[in-house]
Image (tube, helix red, strand yellow):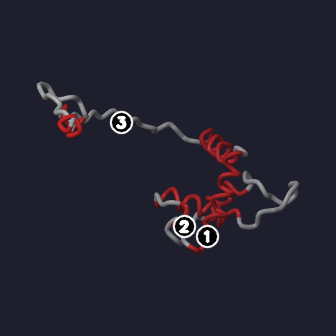
Amino acid sequence: MRRYALRDDQWTRIEGLLPGRSGHVGMTARDNRLFVEAVLYRYRAGIPWRDLPERFGSWKAVHTRYSRWAKGGVWERLLRHFAAEADTEYAMLDSTVVRAHQHSSGAPKKGVVSRPSGAARVA
């Protein structure tokens, strides 16, 4: 199995929730699995659309279809469906606090006078 590929059991769970199913009005999308894997690959790898591997087809076609699904609410519908199924019995929150020096946070330094720019000296 490829690193970012969906397992068959994962695909079976989402396949019926996607547009383009047979019996629906419009063109049936035979390549929904490849498309979903392309989107997952893009987000998991943290790459720009243009850097999608060629095995997913044209990056522009993937991006266009992704945008169309986003505008149509497909991704939100998928996330809501799986959020409702989530088993949160053992969910945990991490409330770790990491202290940082005041200067690392961009806080103004005390007692520092800003110097005039070079343009002020020329005038």
Question: Pointer 3: what residue?
Answer: 94
Question: In x, y percent, where is residue 75?
Answer: 65, 47
| Secondary structure of residue under mark 1 | helix
The kind of residue on which mark 3 rests is Asp
Which class describes the residues within 10 Å of circle 3: few (<14), some (14-19), or many (20+)?
few
For marks 1 and 3, the one nearer the N-term is 1
* Cα–Cα gap, marks 1 and 3: 37 Å
Q: Which residue position holds label 2?
A: 52
Mark 1 neighbour class, 10 Å CA radius: few under 14, some 14 to 19, many 20 or more: some
Figure check: 38 above or below 25: below
Q: Amino acid at mark 2?
A: Leu
Mark 2 or mark 3: which is in front? Answer: 2
Q: Residue at x 33, y 32 (%)?
A: 95
How far across and how far down the image is residue 28, in percent?
81, 62
Relative to 81, is 102 above or below?
Answer: above
Closest to the observer: 99 or 52? 52
Disc 1 versus disc 3: nearer the observer = 1
Residue 56 marker: 1
Q: Is residue 100 visible?
A: no
Q: Could you tell me residue 10's position as x and y percent?
A: 61, 58
Image point (17%, 31%), residue name: 114
Q: Which mark is residue 8?
A: none
The residue lying at 67 percent from left, 58 percent from top is: 64
Mark 1 and mark 2 in contact? Answer it, CB < 8 Å: yes
Residue furthest to the bottom in view is 55
Observer-nearest of 118 and 25 = 118
Q: Determine which quarter of the picture holds residue 49.
A: bottom right
Q: Is residue 97 visible?
A: yes
Three-letter residue code for mark 1: Phe
Helix, strand or loop under label 3: loop
Mark 2 crowd level (few <14, some 14–19, many ≥20, 10 Å Cα): some
